[in-house]
Amino acid sequence: MEQLITKAKGGDVESINFIINKYKNFVFKKASGYHIPGYDFEDLVQHGYLSIIKAIRMYKLGSRSYNGYFINAISTNFAALLKGEIKHFREVPDYNILNKDKEYEFTVEDEVIAYDQIKKLYEAMDKLEPLEREIISRYYINNEKFKDIAEDKKLLYDRTIYLRRRAIRKLRGIMEKKQ
């Protein structure tokens, strides 16, 4: 194996591929054990292969502990990748923080658009049945609970919810036709 590593250090592609294939299963095992944001399995396997190539370059010939060295190098590089990514996500600045205190300034155009949409909504609500319109108004505008509306109108709770859903579907249909 020392001779193979010597050839690989010299740039012999076949020797590098042989060493990579020798530790391929270990790389797969390590890659499947890590879940790093922004990396999928193939990225982690590629990182493992690069760890092997780096270990070939850094291995001291004559140490005779190549197996432990390569396994340790792969494990250490995966741990370092995870640590680096955690640190990276912790330090990513949020440039929008500075703008969160500013309130949005409504323009005249915004107000005209909002007025037009409200006008269309009220026109659509006029086309609903009186009971549906009352349920929508009391629930969304007056913030009343379905339980109170149902008791007041002498309806079942489920019936009140059904009428609201039906009214919403009708309103959507009417509003889509107007656009």
Image: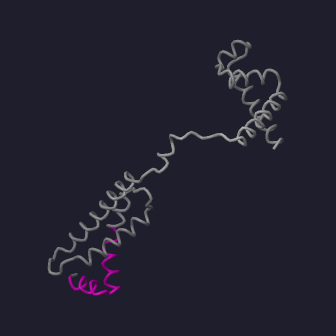
Residue that appears at 27% across and 84% down: 9
Quarter of the picture holding the N terminus: bottom left
- Name above or below for residue 144 compared with residue 52: above
Judging depth in this view, the residue of 119 and 16 nearest the camera is 119
The answer to which of 12 and 4 lies nearer the viewer is: 12
Q: Nearer the viewer, residue 132 or 4?
A: 132
The stretch in magenta equals 2-25
Q: Would you say 57 lies left or right of 145 here? A: left
Farthest-out residue, right: 127
**Figure label count:** 0
The x, y position of residue 47, in whole percent, is 37, 68
In front of the other: 176 or 118 = 118
Write the residue at 66% across / 20% down. 146
**Split into 4 quadrants, where in the image is the C terminus?**
top right
Residue 145 relative to residue 72: left or right:
right
What predominant SS class does the magenta segment belong to? helix
Task: Point out residue 52 in the picture as x, y percentages from the top left corner.
Answer: 30, 73
**86 over 57 or under it: above or below:** above
In this rendering, the answer to whether 9 lies above or below 87 is below
Residue 139 point in image, percent of width and height: 68, 23
The residue located at (69%, 24%) in the rendering is 141
Query: Where on the picture, by quarter, is residue 24?
Result: bottom left
Q: Residue at x 42, y 52 (%)?
A: 93
Q: Is residue 14 magenta?
A: yes
Q: Position of residue 48 (x, y in %)?
A: 34, 68
Quadrant in the picture for residue 67:
bottom left
| 113 drawn magenta | no
Q: Is residue 15 left or right of residue 174?
A: left
Q: Quadrant of residue 169?
A: top right
